[in-house]
Amino acid sequence: MVTLALVVLNVAVFLVELSQGSDIDAFVGRWGLVPADVHEGPAAAVTLFTSTFIHTGWFHLGANMVYLVVFGRPVEQRIRATRFVALYVVSGLVGSLAYLVAQPTSQAPAVGASGAIAGVIAAHLVLFPGATLGSIAPVLFLHVVESTPTLLLLLVWLATQVLSSVASLTTSTGIAWWAHLGGFASGLVLAPVLRRHRSRGGIS
């Protein structure tokens, strides 16, 4: 239910964003993460969190929500709701901080749930190392696709994030690649901890 609630929340915020009309740029600038402004105080620092619920368009939102549903549901079932919320929020914040450290003077607002979702993807990699595409999203009549390990696709995804992050140090891509990597690293660290705590302390 947490995965579904997060999808609904992200869509709701996007609809609020669209309702701004001609003021949408001001809305994104206020609630998106602008590294150059974060030092101004708590009102700006809160964007480390709020920026994770803002998206640049339907495709950006849709792609993130697909990844969240596909990888989030099994992770939530494994570690349970409370710890899944912690995984999502902490990964999002770590992703935002990674972008802030990598590009501290940037004045372009960074937005999107990619850092949080990268953490969920990494947690899935840790918790379900032998998973295949067919085990999380069966595709009829395409056995080769169904038997493809998610590990392979996630490693390819991670490689593209690394290359894009290095490139973003010298070029303006408009995408917070370092937030993706920060969130992914957070998920790798948190997943075994959350799994171990569940086995010791029961279900929450």
Image (tube, grey):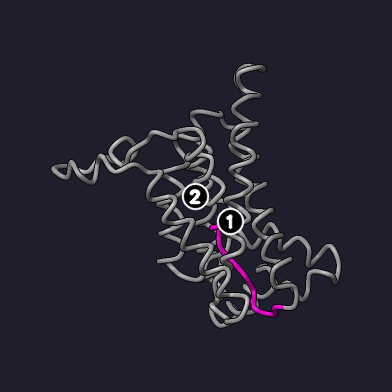
Which image quarter: residue 104? bottom right
Q: Look at 51% across and 62% down and name the residue there.
A: 161
Between residues 30 and 105, which one lies in front from this camera angle?
A: 105
Assign the magenta stretch its main secondary structure.
Answer: loop
* For marks 2 and 1 on the same chain, the one whose residue lies earlier in the sequence: 2
The crowd level at tag 2 (other Cα within 10 Å; few <14, some 14-19, many 20+) is few
Q: Quadrant of the C terminus?
A: top right
| Label 2 with label 1: CB-CB less than 8 Å | no
Amino acid carrying mark 2 in the image: Val
The residue lying furthest to the left in this view is 141
- The disc at residue 93 is none
* Disc 2: which residue: 8
Q: Nearer the viewer, residue 51 or 194?
A: 194
Magenta residues span 106-115
Is 46 on the left or on the right of 203, as rendered? right
Side of 121 where 147 appears, left or right: left
Residue 193: image quadrant is top right
Query: Residue at left 57%, top 51%?
Result: 184
- x, y (%) of residue 129? 44, 35
- Which one is nearer the viewer's eye here, 23 or 142? 142
Q: Determine the secondary structure under disc 2.
A: helix
Q: What amino acid is found at the position of numbered circle 1 in the picture?
A: Gly
Residue located 57% across and 68% down the image = 165
Q: Nearer the viewer, mark 2 or mark 1?
A: 1
Q: Tell me residue 180's x, y (percent).
A: 56, 59
Question: Does the magenta-highlighted stretch encompass residue 34?
Answer: no
Q: Position of residue 177 (x, y in %)?
A: 56, 66
Place residue 182 in its image quadrant: bottom right
Total marks drawn?
Answer: 2
> On the image, numbered disc 1 is attached to which residue?
115
